[in-house]
Amino acid sequence: AYREMGFLPDAMFNYLLRLGWSHGDTEFFSRAQAVDWFSLDQVGKSPARFDLEKLRGVNAHYLQQLDAASLYDLILPHVTSTSQHAKDRVIALLPLFKERAKTHLDILPLLDFLLHDGAPNMTDDAAALLNSEAKDRLLKLAETLANSSWQKADLEQNLQAFLEHNGLKMRDIGLPLRAAVTGMKQTPSIVDIMAALGEDETLGRLRLACK
């Protein structure tokens, strides 16, 4: 049941062992270290209490240790598209998406916009950001970025140049840009997302959102 809840075996092992045993202040350890360090005189006498939130915290630690390919394998049974370009997008962004996740299941709601081309499914609060002023700015941005380098560093530089040229701050365009590209109000770095989606897909989404 806990595996289906997104808990990793090593996290479960670590948490359960620490319920009644400790090795100084060491919070995390491998199974080999546990075997090497275990001693009955370090077993606590007080009754242990299972805390699901603490288990989620331990699991988050082990989740951060996974590389993108291993994390993708955990997510794969839950995704609706197994196309190569969807996989490439997800793997490119998993290091960002896992930063605040406690289990790999926490990441799943964030992936929908990566799994298909075209306009993303948009939340109501994201759609509300796309007023006429925001759409005008996004269309100008799309024109500016068209046929420019799509490397992350160049995207950052070109986006900053656009803001300065138009007397804007990132706060003036950041949320509508996220909404148009991802369908969500809050995401990790939008520049990383744009780089992973690619020029054609990103600009296509901007133009669709501004119709």
Image (cartoon, rainbow, N blue to C red):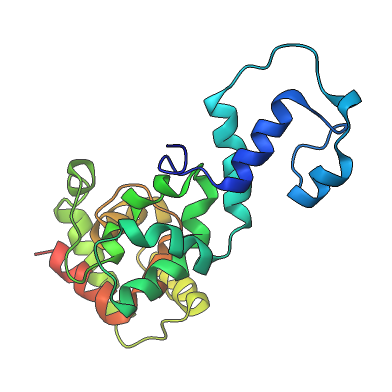
Toward the front, the furthest residue is 40
Toward the left, the furthest residue is 211
Give the camera-side residue of 58 and 200.
Answer: 58
The image shows residue 204 at horizontal and vertical percentages of 20, 74
So how many labels did they put on this image?
Answer: 0
The image shows residue 34 at horizontal and vertical percentages of 80, 43
Give above or below for 210 relative to 59. below
The image shows residue 142 at horizontal and vertical percentages of 26, 74
Name which quarter of the figure residue 78 lies in.
bottom left
Give above or below for 179 relative to 139. above
Name which quarter of the figure residue 134 lies in.
bottom left
Quadrant assignment for the N terminus = top left
Give the camera-side residue of 112 and 37.
Answer: 37
Which residue is at 16% across, 62% downward? 209
Give the camera-side residue of 126 and 45.
Answer: 45
- Would residue 142 be found to the left or right of residue 97 on screen? left
- Would residue 134 be found to the left or right of residue 67 on screen? left
Can residue 160 be spotted in the picture?
Answer: no
Which residue is at 57% across, 43% downward? 60
